[in-house]
Image (cartoon, grey):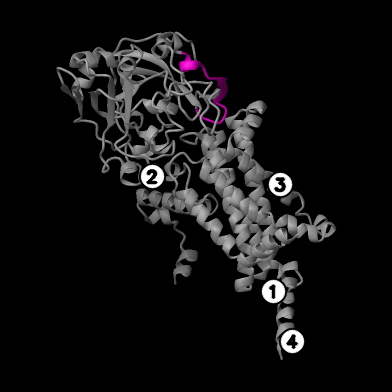
Amino acid sequence: MLFKNFFKSALSESDVTDENIYRQRRELLTKMGYLGAGALVSGLSPYGHANWFSGDKKPNFVTSDLTYKAAENISGQLLTSEEKVTTHNNFYEFGSQKHQPFELSQQFKVNPWQLKVSGECDKPFTLDYDDLFKRFELEERIYRLRCVEAWSMVIPWQGFSLANLLKQASPNSKAKYVVFETLHDPEQMPGQANRRLGGGIQYPYTEGLRIDEAMNSLTLLSVGLYGKTLPPQNGAPIRLVVPWKYGFKSIKSIVSIKLVSSPPQTTWNQLAPQEYGFYANVNPMHDHPRWSQATERRITGNGLFAASRINTLPFNGYGEQVAHLYKGMDLHKYY
Amino acid sequence: MKTAIKSEKVSSKRKVNDAFIGKGKGKGKGTILIVKLLIHCISITPLVIIYMQAFTGHLLGDPVEQLIHFTGIGAFNLLLITLCVSPLAKKFGLHFLMKVRRLLGLYSFFYALLHLSNFLAFDLQFDGALFISEVIKRPYITVGMLAFMILTMLAITSHNQLKKKMGKQWQSLHNCSYFIVLLVSVHFYWSVKSELTSPLFYAGLTLLILLLRYKKLKNLISSRFSQ
């Protein structure tokens, strides 16, 4: 009966089915067929195809334009394309594979937001969502971002110096370190709810700086990139950018900045202390135990060939501004 | 009475072995051809898709990392499947599967070759000196490279004529596949940054497949030590 109808009918399925439903079915079939074949060979991890065939696409997170003091690209290095900056991310809260933060974060709610500044200071305060963009004058900084995994990008950030924010809190004499914490919200951050998706790290993600590092004028609190507010995968609504340190120091979606007196525990350092130090300064002379840090893959755009292998510079090329912070320290011991 | 049972056992063993070598009746050529075609399709299609996406810039995230992971896991999967063939053939009498084992093994080698090429070409961008120093300095790459070199020898000697020429040596060389699968699971485990579920799952599969050959491996090891 079924076959008879199938063969005799002059109408195609699309003629009798609502077009949208038809399309959804087609997409579902493609998805199933593809995953069926792919899963056999690629096993548990369907790397990077879900987005391609996903039928029920929800709208992307909406960013808005920022007003800021523009910067010149002094180094003249080619900027990494905005598309690449926003689709190639390490943000384990939204999945440990590079394409997942974009795919799994578009429904993330950033307003209302509260950023608490507290600890060893005279004037603790809390910033609401609007304060993040209004309290301090926004300026642009074009920085190189060097990941500990030996790839890098060049990104135009918008934000303000962390020093400006810390000064408002009036740190007291006991304030020797600054601890940062990412939002902990397993309902919105699937990586925090699922150990496998979240890469098995401890949440909330915690990072720290020495007070002089935090007060250095290069250290930026970013609220935007490419002239617009940050998308979730890049750490909306506010993140740290420390350009002379490996990327994992630049903590995202911050809810707490606390001044403390003793060295804080930080996420990656706790997980694998022999691989990720507290300082994590970019250092081509000190290899990661499992790969060389002497060179890096500079990513500029999409595709396999939009990258080149270049030499890594000490302090990611920012030695002039920050090398003095580590004078007399053995950088192999304090890596 | 006892000797009769023994001889029966021997003859049934021989039958199985004959089937393995390809003299058994079992399934016809048609079935084997279909299974081979299926293996070709299932192995090649995902590669074509992912490389097309990568070359056209449609792969989100890091295309280099995705290609390396995809071909690496693919090689591991195919190696495990290859090693499932003879237990399946013995347990369920699916002797025709033995005829497609070499093809599966060669696809595993092909994926491994792509895995290594992706690392050298797209990640290291043909920096030969860096490649050599990474192979020497990083234990997980050393182990992976060793596995690849042995796998290459197996692929080269998989040709029928070479197999005949090598006689008994062939089997002892190809027993190295058990060693390869162990190396590969160590390579995977060491290469991972934090999350250990997948490499542990694969290590479990590897041990299971080796356990199926408990007797053979025990004999192999004891003969090595008694020599």
Say which residue label 4 marks: B3
Q: Position of residue A304 (x, y in %)?
A: 56, 31
Check the image and report above or below for A45 versus B23: above
Task: Using the numbered discs, state the Cα–Cα distance from disc 2 to disc 3 in whole angstroms.
Answer: 34 Å
The amino acid on which the numbered mark 4 sits, given as a three-letter code, is Thr
Whether residue A230 appears in magenta in the rendering, the answer is: no
In the foreground, A174 or B13 = A174
Residue A307: x and y, percent? 55, 25
Residue B193 percent across, percent down from the top left: 46, 39
Q: Is mark 3 on a helix, strand or loop?
A: helix
Same chain for mark 2 and mark 3? The answer is no
The residue that label 3 is drawn on is B152
Mark 1 vs mark 2: give the one in front.
2
Image side of residue A332 versus residue A208, left or right: right
Q: Is residue A98 left or right of residue B109?
A: left
Per the rendered image, the range of residues in magenta is: A302-317
Q: Mark 1 points at which residue?
A: B26
Specify the amino acid type for callout 3.
Thr
SS at circle 4: helix
Front label number (4 vs 3):
4
Determine whether label 1 and label 3 are within 8 Å by CB.
no
Work out whether B24 lies above or below B173: below
Q: In which quarter of the image is residue B15?
A: bottom right
